[in-house]
Amino acid sequence: MLRKRAERMYDEKLDLSQPIVWESEEERAAAIAFFNAAYRAEESGLTQAHELAQEVAAWDPDLAECLRLYGNEEGWHRELLTEFLAWIGGTIKPMGRVTGTFYKLYGRAERMETIVLTNLMFETIGSTTYRLALRRATHPAVRQMLTILTRDESFHVPLNVHFLRQVLARTPWISRQRLKPLYHLLYGTLIASAYASRRRALKFDKIPFADLSKAYAEHLGKLFIHESDLALRPSTAILRLFGLRRSELARAEDLSAVSVLAAEAAVDRERVIVNAL
Ligand SMILES: [Fe+2]
Ligand SMILES: [Fe+2]
C-alpha cells in the first residue's frame, strides 16, 4: 500500500487560487506559527524514518522499505508546508527554546524502540491537532492543507504501531521495560505542550486549551488500550483530571485508532471521506 500511495503522491497539488483574507495580522502570525510547528514535525519524522530505514535494512529489507516510503510521505508533507507557508507570507523560523530542546533530545535518541514510540506519540498529537483545526477551518486552501495532513497522519498512527511491534519483537525484555517510563513521560509532556502551542497558534486554529489538552489525553491514552501485550496504559490520575476513564476509552464500539482496520480505513487516499475526518 505504501508503494501504491507513493505512485500518486506527487500528483496531488495545493489549490492556492483563492487568497486568504485574515481577520487580523495576529491571526496570520498564528497561522504561520501553526504551520511552522507542523513543518518541524514533518522534518523530524522524515529524518528519523530514513535513519531507521538504514539501520533496519540489515535485518529486514521490507520493513526498511516501508520506513523509507513512510519517510518520503513526511518529506512530501514538508514540501507542501514549505509552499503553503510561503503563500501565506511566512518563512520557516528557527525553533523556539522549548521545541528546540525537545527535538534535540529526540534527535539524540538511539534506541530504535524509543525513537518509534516517540514518533508514534508525535504522530498522534499531530493527527489530533490537524483534525480539530480542520473542523474549525473555513478557507478552502487551509482546509485542503489540513485535510491532507489529517488524512495521512491517521494512516501513519497505525503504521507506526506496526513499526513499534516489529522493532519490539527484536528488543530484549529489559529494553521493553524502558518504554513504560518514556510513555508516561511523553503522555504528560505532550498534554502539557498544548498549553505552549495555545500561546502561539490559538488565534488561527481556534482550539481552546481545554479541548486540545483533553483530546491529547484521550487519543494518547487510547493508543494502546486494546494492545494489552504492550502494557502501555495511561495514568488513571491524568485521565481523571480530564474527566476520562479507561473503561470509556476502551469501549468496544470505538475502533482502536491503531488497529489494522483503522489503517485500512485510512490507507487509500481517494477513499477517505473528508467529513469522516
Ligand atoms: Fe506528516
Ligand atoms: Fe506522519
Image (cartoon, rainbow, N blue to C red):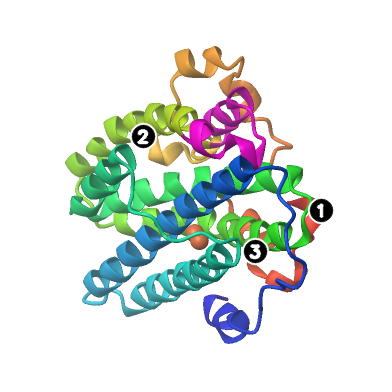
The region drawn magenta spans 197-219
Could you tell me which secondary element the residue under label 1 belongs to? helix
Asked whether residue 201 is drawn in magenta, I would say yes
Q: Compare marks 1 and 2 and give the one earlier in the sequence.
A: 2
Q: Is residue 196 left or right of residue 213?
A: left
Name the residue that disc number 3 marks.
148
Image quadrant occupied by the N terminus = bottom right
Q: Residues within 10 Å of mark 2 (few under 14, many from 20)?
A: some
Type of amino acid under label 1: Asn
Residue drawn at (77%, 61%) of the image: 140
Name the front one of labels 2 and 3. Answer: 3
Residue drawn at (76%, 69%) of the image: 271
* Mark-to-mark CA distance, 1 and 3: 13 Å
Question: x%, y% of residue 98?
Answer: 31, 37
Q: Nearer the viewer, residue 120 or 40?
A: 40
Residue drawn at (25%, 42%) of the image: 101
In the rendered view, tell whether residue 171 sits above or below residue 6.
above
Is most of the magenta stretch helix, strand or loop? helix
Could you tell me which secondary element the residue under label 3 belongs to? helix
Type of amino acid under label 3: Ile
Name the residue that disc number 2 marks.
186
